[in-house]
Amino acid sequence: MKKTKDIVILGIESSCDDTSAAITCNDMIISNEVSGQTVHKAYGGVVPELASRAHQQNIIPVVDLAIKNSGVSIDDISAVAFTRGPGLLGSLLVGTSFAKGFALAKNLPLIEVNHLHGHVLAHFIKEKSVETKTPGFPFLCLLVSGGNSQIIFVRDHLDMEVIGQTIDDAAGEAFDKCAKVMGLPYPGGPLVDKLAKEGNAKAFVFAKPKIQGLDYSFSGLKTSFLYFIRDKMAENPNFIEECKADICASLQYTIIEVLMTKLRQAAKETGIRTIAVAGGVSANSGLRQALTDASVKYNWEMHIPPFKFTTDNAAMIAITGYYKYLKGEFTTHDVVPFSRVSMK
Ligand code: KG4
């Protein structure tokens, strides 16, 4: 039951291939529904047009379920927050249009949310009966997903700056594309992680990028991996089958080394020791171990959110909406989605 001063936000996320709706009451999540899309499995990656169509089918049932499971009445909702971008334009259009329609019908304020901002604020989602230790400001957030690899300097809930980012592919893309070269299904990241556990991370050496400053690059690794597999398969057609675990372990080790090198550099340059991680790739067990090891070695205070809040979800959109609501940051109905945008 909503108290008079409670702020109840309906969050909508539809930037890629997950349709999600969530309800927050102040900074507490009270429901979070996610509907994935299996239709892409056959194509080795997300097919934008199929994603938009699936969002259209899923959006109403998912929102309906989120409201029902929250226990709040539709009339208790204070505002609608939605992902404006970055992401796939057709997918974003579905969530944006739905949010606008809902807000108009219920005469509610509309709040646009940058998807990357949402990933960072996932660290501030509170759950009933779960103790949450939120990071203190300022902190650094390593945001690693299928579409982004960034180091973000977070000064406050609504004040953050990207201090390093990929100049080409994202870390998740490197996992997925290399996995595809090995014949693994999409998304390859979780499979590489699983196979890597049985392999030797030092079995093969892949070239690491030499990029200035705090920026990342993963396209060179992807190309050198492709040539490596092609050459090895020419020598031994069973190479992938025979060495799968070692290849995955070595690939994962390289990606993590690249991510950690710049993160260590960022911590050193800024003097910040509160470190958070966000995005789908933060589910990677090797990365989690590397972060845990670094936190012991460098005396970092590490923040790793629960798995369900690292992948795409509307809870992070609703919580960002809550903080924007407090500051009166609303948007108008002529707002349109954007496919590409940085945080600043
Ligand atoms: O944040 P996210 O759910 O979605 C978008 O980026 O849109 O991230 C998905 C990415 C994919 O590239 C997937 O392969 C990767 O996260 N991923 C992983 C793991 N779990 C998900 N990569 C490596 N190891 C994992 N365990």
Image (cartoon, grey):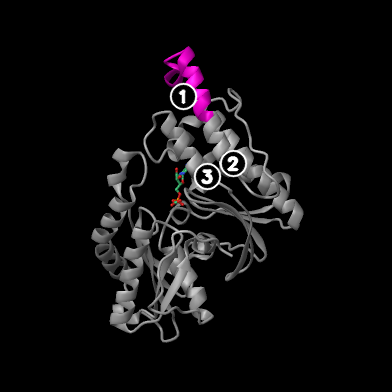
Please state which of residues 133 and 220 is positioned toward the viewer in this rendering.
220
Do the CB atoms of the residues marked 1 and 3 lie less than 8 Å apart? Answer: no
Was residue 242 drawn as part of the magenta stretch in this picture? yes
Residue under label 3:
169
Q: Circles 1 and 2: CB distance less than 8 Å?
A: no
Q: Amino acid at mark 1?
A: Lys
- Residue at image position (44%, 59%) is 339
For marks 3 and 2 on the same chain, the one whose residue lies earlier in the sequence: 3
Residue 342: percent from left, percent from top: 55, 61
Marking on residue 244: 1
Question: Does 313 sit above or below residue 28?
Answer: above
Residue type marked 3: Asp
Which of 322/289 is in front? 322
The tag on residue 289 is 2
Q: Secondary structure at mark 2?
A: helix
Q: From the viewer's perspective, tell me whether residue 287 is left or right of residue 214.
A: left
